[in-house]
Image (spheres, rainbow, N blue to C red):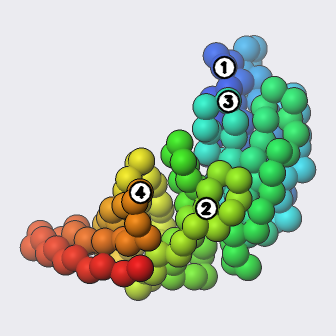
Amino acid sequence: SALYSTGVLLGDNMVLSGSFDGSLRVWDFRTPPAACVRMLPAHEGGVHCIVPDHDLIYSAGEDGHIRLWDPRIWRTLNCFGASNSPISSLGVDSMKIMSTSKNTQAIRLWEKTGKPLSTLPLVWSSACVSCSEDRVFASEDKQVKIWHLSPYSNSLSSSSSSSSSSSSSSSSSSS
């Protein structure tokens, strides 16, 4: 099946990729040509995202689910539904997971256990999402939005910056 999501390096000579058929594939690059040494059924439909997190790997795809994998034993440790829409982007930090879906205008935040934390509204569907310990970043409609997450309250503040030559910035608070 055709490669659908970018690979994740596993050690010096192994790469993990996601495919249109919903599988994760482990590739061995020690000798040319590269060989697929393991194929894991992962999602119903294509695998859109693969994100490493220390010794674990998260995958997300067309089925709207997020899976947590242990690459030492190639087993799913957790699977939870993020949406009824295909997940287009996935971000992970030490405390949380965030996802965006192709057909929704929101970023969903999750604890690493899969427990929902909150939803951040977007005007358009986001093409990408990433995070740091106290911020969530998203791209939408030629803008980058930044949410500052307060660890001591449920408050979120957001700001956006346009990518055009005239930069604009706005802030708002929501709970």
Question: Pointers 4 and 1 in contact (CB under 8 A)?
Answer: no
Q: Marks 3 and 2: which is nearer the front?
A: 2
State the mark number for residue 110: 2
Label 3 SS? loop
Name which of mark 3 and mark 1 comes first in the sequence.
1
Q: Which mark is residue 11?
A: 1
Q: Earlier in the sequence, mark 4 or mark 1?
A: 1
Residue 38 visible in image: yes
Q: Which residue is mark 3?
A: 55
Residue furthest to the bottom: 123
Q: Give percent across and percent down for residue 142.
A: 31, 73
* Mark 3 neighbour class, 10 Å CA radius: few under 14, some 14 to 19, many 20 or more: few
Q: CA distance from mark 3 to mark 1?
A: 11 Å
Identify the residue at image location x=38%, y=72%.
155
* Type of amino acid under label 3: Asp
Instruction: Compare residues 145 and 77 and report the one nearer the observer.
Output: 77
